[in-house]
Amino acid sequence: MKLDTKFMLETFIDVLGGVPVTLKITIVTLLVSVPAGFMMALSRAGNGRIGRRIIIAYVSLIRGTPVVLQILFLYSLLPTLLNYLIKEILGLEYNIFRLDPILYAYSVFILNTTAVLSEVFRSALSTVNQGQMEAALSIGMTKTQAYIRIIVPQALVAALPNICNTTVSLLKSTSLAFMMTVRDITAIAKIDASFGYNYLEAYLVIFFAYILLCSLVQGVFYLTEHSVSSYRREKAIRKAPVMQNG
Amino acid sequence: MLEVKNVHKAFGHNEVLKGVDIKVDKGDIIVILGPSGSGKTTFLRCLNFLEKADQGTMDFDDIHTELKSASKSVITKVRRKTAFVFQNYNLFQNKTAIQNVMEGLTVARKVPKEEARQIAQQALDKVGLEDRYDYYPSQLSGGQQQRVGIARAIAVNPDVLLFDEPTSALDPELIGEVLTVMKKLAKEGATMIIVTHEMSFAQEVASKVIFMDGGVVVEQGSAKQIFTAPKEERTSQFLHRVLKDYDYVI
Ligand SMILES: Nc1ncnc2c1ncn2[C@@H]1O[C@H](COP(=O)(O)OP(=O)(O)OP(=O)(O)O)[C@@H](O)[C@H]1O
Ligand SMILES: [Mg+2]
């Protein structure tokens, strides 16, 4: 068997056109899910009982079901429901089936990523010891000030490696967006391949496209981590010059 | 200046404080002694509202409050007049030494940044860290970290400094540098309440020694009286035990 390299090059160029869509889904999802997940982690650490129960239920529901199933559910159920709502209850003339499918993609991935990140932030918050909160209170800071200036910045740094993992797996699962007829990288490759049945070549091309994108994400996180966690990194360096004083 | 009466505190069924009183005058150096689990830390934390007592009253200059029902504004006022030095330093890990000290000034008291920096520098100089302003806690030794903790406490100019076993997490060779700083503060007239197991330090600086056991104050008096002529059996047993250990270490 011979690979059709000309087809592969053409597909690669086509696929580049899908990169913005893939990145857009990833970024929009993160922009919503990072703050939402953080708020959830914070309110779980607080003492509202009902809120905590709801969050726990939500997280286990999402994490206990496959993303594919969530997509199938949302994509088949939501339009019908919305259509009913708009037509029958609000009495409006709007064809819900003309809605940009990317909105469904946002919904699924936001629901998913928020659940994952709320767990990430919960464990990150628990790595900042309670003593620092007490120290902040003891010098007259309020709880909110202590959270904003002391606890949250450290929790974010502690969470960075896991946020990176979450982002990479989010980026990969956006490939399921084709199921919702979103024209992302995967969808474009499948369409190109369907003309001449060059599926193998098309999949090889996006294989590399995803590797490239994921490496890029990891690189960005690596640099970020190094620039914000200087206060922890120094630990290893400390041993070198022993300077005594006092 | 500060008088606290009849402090009770229980954790579940475990009654830790069973009516503790303390009276502090300006310039007092009060040392609290007692066996492990006697409630010393809990008592100190109640004074700063890090722990909410179940019962008891506090008179602090013009403030009068029940400990249990103290309002937020009273708690803030009391915290402004006190400062706590913790056993495990509890420095802000994401801030440098000088930022740790400035935080209570700029954030909690809205002191302008430049002024705060000067106060913080003075405080760090006082504890002998004039060459460590920009070091993160993770770059400092335990003794240096605890001295930053002390600088953070004195920078906010509190009426009373509270110390909870400030040296017990330190390697023996680092204890001296922290005690030296505390002696210096004592000499300058700071008012302090100190929980410690450092007996010779207690003997040297205390203007009053309180011996606690089982959640009550068993005995109190001058350092000389407590160490040389304790009235209560439990006090002399405790001193006998720790002073023996102490000799043993030397
Ligand atoms: N947050 C808490 N929850 C439950 N029990 C607690 C809590 N804090 C303290 N205790 C209990 O209160 C008792 C007194 O503790 P405390 O720390 O005040 O003793 P201490 O005199 O400071 O002892 P040490 O010399 O070992 O520091 C102990 O039995 C301890 O188990
Ligand atoms: Mg203690």
Image: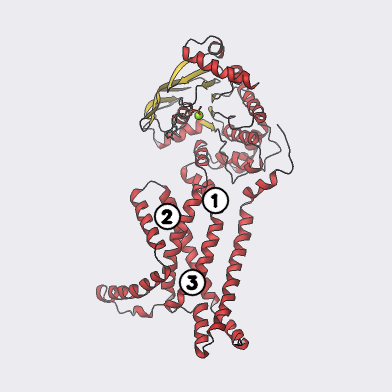
Q: Vertically, is B38 above or below A16?
A: above
Identify the image's colour scheme: rainbow, by chain, secondary structure or one colour. Answer: secondary structure
- Rate crowding at label 3 as few (under 14), some (14 to 19) or many (20 or more) other CA atoms within 10 Å: many
Disc 1 on helix, strand or loop?
helix
Q: Earlier in the sequence, mark 1 or mark 2?
A: 2
Q: CA distance from mark 2 to mark 3?
A: 23 Å
Residue B114 in view here: no
Residue A174 image label: 3
Q: CA distance from mark 3 to mark 1?
A: 29 Å
Q: Residue at x 57, y 31 (%)?
A: B157
The location of residue B172, given as percent across then percent down, is: 65, 29
Disc 3 vs disc 1: Cβ atoms closer than 8 Å? no
Subunit of label 2 = A
Check disc 1 and report the residue beneath it. Answer: A153
Disc 1 vs disc 2: Cβ atoms closer than 8 Å? no
Residue B239 in view here: yes
Q: Vertically, is B91 above or below A187?
A: above
Is the residue marked 2 within 8 Å of ligand 1, measured from its CB? no
- Rate crowding at label 2 as few (under 14), some (14 to 19) or many (20 or more) other CA atoms within 10 Å: many
Asked whether, in this view, residue A150 is left or right of residue B126, the answer is left
Q: Earlier in the sequence, mark 3 or mark 1?
A: 1
* Dot 3 amino acid type: Thr
- Rate crowding at label 1 as few (under 14), some (14 to 19) or many (20 or more) other CA atoms within 10 Å: some
Q: Earlier in the sequence, mark 2 or mark 3?
A: 2
Q: Vertically, is A58 above or below B173?
A: below
The location of residue B84, given as percent across then percent down, is: 53, 32
* Dot 1 amino acid type: Pro
Q: Residue at x 37, y 59 (%)?
A: A58
The location of residue A137, given as percent across then percent down, is: 49, 38
Residue A40 image label: 2
Q: Residue at x 28, y 73 (%)?
A: A85
